């Protein structure tokens, strides 16, 4: 996922969550992209680092396995948002 796509997804998801806190995120397989967005949301909304956010997401969705290079992109992106 490109950083600009990820930033757009995070901002859109945050907007939805503000009006509807129980929000369902899903991509085709539900293992890489949607968990990546969930990790970004948890990191932003809870003020935690990416690895802590990933641990929290995996508590609810143990099969979450975002691509590690995407987690690196997410970490860099969060520093600018």
Image (tube, helix red, strand yellow):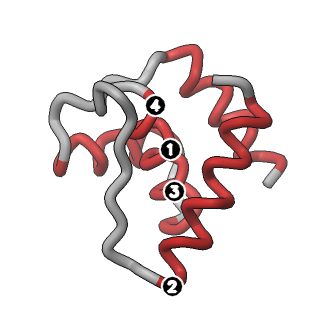
The residue lying at 50 percent from left, 44 percent from top is: 37
Residue 65 falls left or right of residue 12: left
Secondary structure of residue under mark 1 = helix
Q: Nearer the viewer, mark 3 or mark 2?
A: 2
Q: Residue furthest bottom?
A: 19
* N-term-proximal mark, 4 vs 3: 4
Image position, residue 27 (x, y; %): 39, 35
* Callout 3–callout 1 Cβ contact below 8 Å: yes
- The residue depicted at 71 percent of the width and 36 percent of the height is 5
Q: Check disc 3: other Cα within 10 Å, few if <14, some if 14-19, many if 20+.
A: many
Q: Which residue is mark 1?
A: 37
Q: Nearer the viewer, mark 4 or mark 3?
A: 4
Q: Check whether the beta carbons of the residues at disc 4 and disc 3 lie within 8 A of each other.
A: no
Residue at numbered disc 2: 19
**Relative vertical location of residue 45 with respect to residue 37 in this rendering, above or below:** below
The local secondary structure at tag 4 comes to: helix
Quarter of the image for residue 54 reads top left
Whole-Å distance between the Cαs marked 1 and 2? Answer: 18 Å
Viewer-closest of 65 and 56 = 65
Q: Is residue 77 left or right of residue 70?
A: right
Q: CA distance from mark 3 to mark 1?
A: 6 Å
Residue in view at x 48 percent, y 73 percent: 17
Nearer to us of marks 1 and 2 is 2
Are the residues at dot 4 and dot 1 in contact (C-beta closer than 8 Å)? yes
| Image quarter of the C terminus | bottom right
Q: CA distance from mark 4 to mark 1?
A: 6 Å
Q: Which mark is residue 41?
A: 3
Task: Mark 2 or mark 4: name the one nearer the start of the chain.
Answer: 2
- First of labels 1, 2 by sequence position: 2
Q: CA distance from mark 2 to mark 4?
A: 22 Å
Residue ID for mark 4: 33
- Between 31 and 68, the one lying in front of the other is 31
């Amino acid at each position: 996922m490109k950083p600009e796509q990820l930033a757009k997804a995070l901002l859109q998801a945050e907007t939805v969550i503000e009006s509807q806190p129980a929000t369902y995120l899903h991509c085709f397989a539900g293992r890489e992209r949607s968990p990546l967005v969930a990790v970004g949301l948890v990191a932003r909304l809870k003020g935690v680092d990416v690895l802590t956010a990933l641990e929290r997401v995996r508590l609810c969705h143990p099969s979450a396995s975002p691509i590690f290079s995407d987690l690196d992109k997410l970490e860099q992106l969060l520093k600018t948002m």
